[in-house]
Structure formats: structure tokens, C-alpha cells
Image: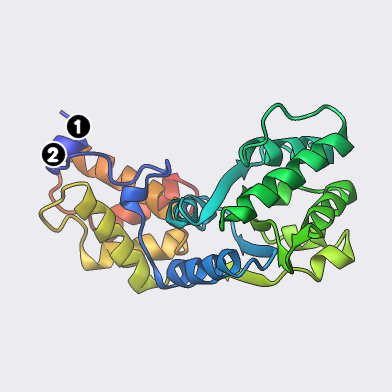
Amino acid sequence: MSYLEHYNLKEEPFSNSVDNRFYYNSKPHAEALIRLKYAAEQRKGLALLVGDVGAGKTTLARRLLDELDESSYESALLIVIHSSITSEWLLRKISVQLGVEKPAEAKTDLLGQLYNRLAEIHDKKKKAVVLIDEAQMLQTREVMEEFRGLLNIELDGHKLITFILFGLPEVDQHLALDEPLRQRVAIRYHLQAFTEESSEDYVKYRLQIAGCKKEIFTKSAYSAVHQYAKGIPRLINTVCDNALLEGYLRKKDRIDHDMIREIAVDLKLADT
């Protein structure tokens, strides 16, 4: 037996893996999507979403990618996994993701291929949009200059590519390595943590998607989850997943404030 059976759940409600079925459209997330989709629709060139660790940036990036209709957009999502990437690596990845076939080895030739591909996308009445997650990993002036060069590519008075960056707040400092690029940020949005009300709704929503048919958390437990997780979705997931496991081990039907506090202490989210 597991906590799924104990609480009559169909699946784990608080996995930190990105799953659009569990996407909770909070007010900050909804507003961010509107702004970022506007940037894509209007070919604004460069948009930026920043947020603290665990705020839901990756979830939002995946959601935005899904909402960019394939009939109107040629879109791609790049995830930067280390800070030592070069401008050539970035250019090659962007080219491949946007459909450049047999990318050339020489940078000048590759730029020509990418321009032709972007012009082809434009001729099809579509818009090229590249989402870049973990953008705080882009830390060199060389990379920033590459972005600025790509944003100079225009046709018929329109930018042929729009970049939407998702990253920690320090991404602003890295963009400042190239001041002309920093000034091209057309849309910037800071994704805030959940309010207490949103935290409670978020937990209830994920439980509902997982098949929950009854109240598992007490009202005071929801408050405690928000307090110790500070409204950060990733931490809310961790606290609640541990709470369900602990509730199962103790054969409890309801999870209360005291249990959440014990879990928060174990997770080093609260003092003893």
C-alpha cells in the first residue's frame, strides 16, 4: 500500500516534474503569459521573465510553448544547462531548432543559412520564436553580442526572430554586459510567489487533478504550507508530497498544521 491508495489518489499530485495537466493558472502566471504572448505576436524581439528559484519559470516556458499555435509560429525551447557555452554553440542550436538543415561549420555560412530559414518562415506568414530557459547561465559578453546581432535581422520592417528568456533575477546583470542589448528588452516581467490564497488553491487544484475526492488538508495546514514554502510552487510540492507520505505512515485521514510544521523542520524550512 502507498499514500496513493491511502488517500484514494490516481497519481502523485505533487511531483516536481513539468506536467501541463497540473498547470495552475495563478494570477501572476496568467499575466505573464499574456505579456509574453504579446511579445511573440507583435515580434518585439526580446522579452524577459525572471523569478526566484522554484517560482515556476520552466513550467511557464513549457506552457507558453504549447500555446504558440503551430499554424502561426515556428517555435522552439532551449534549456541552457551550463555557463560555458559559446556564441557559436548558441547560434548552431537556434539554427537546428528552427529547422536549418545540414548547418554549415563556418559561422558566416551558418548565419546565411539561418537568415534564409527565417525569411522562409516569414514568407509563410509565420513568426519565429525561441524560448530560452535557465537564461542566467548565459554569462558572457560574446553571447550577448550574438543575441544583439540576431535581433538586427529584419525583413519588410519586421524582426525575423523573437527571443523570450526565462531566468533568475541575475540575468539582468548579464544582459547589462551589452548595454545596447539590455535596452532592447521590450517586455520584462517578474514572476512573484503565490499569495496564501493562491497557495491553497494550488494545492487543492493539484489534488483534484490527481483524483482527490475529499478534504485531506485542514485549513490551518494550508496556511502552514504557505508559511513554510513561502508561496514557492516547487517548495509547496515538496512539503505536500512529504505530508501525504507522513500522513499515510501515521494512518491519518487529515493533515494538520502541526504535521506540516514537523515536515518543514525536517526539510530545514523552519527552525526547531
Circle 2 Cα neighbour tier, 10 Å, few/some/many (<14 / 14–19 / ≥20): some
Compared with residue 121, is residue 227 higher up or lower down, i.e. above or below? below
The residue where tag 1 is placed is 2
Q: Amino acid at mark 2?
A: His
Q: Is residue 190 left or right of residue 106?
A: left
Question: Percent x, y for residue 144?
Answer: 83, 53
Compared with residue 33, is residue 67 higher up or lower down, i.e. above or below? above
Rounded to the nearest angstrom, the CA distance separating label 2 from label 1 is 6 Å
Question: Percent x, y for residue 203?
Answer: 30, 58
Callout 1: helix, strand or loop?
Answer: loop
Q: Amino acid at mark 1?
A: Ser
Contact? badges 2 and 1 (CB < 8 Å): yes
Circle 1 Cα neighbour tier, 10 Å, few/some/many (<14 / 14–19 / ≥20): few
Which residue is rendered at x = 62% and y = 37% of the image?
99
Which residue is rendered at x = 50% and y = 57% of the image?
72
Q: How many marks?
A: 2
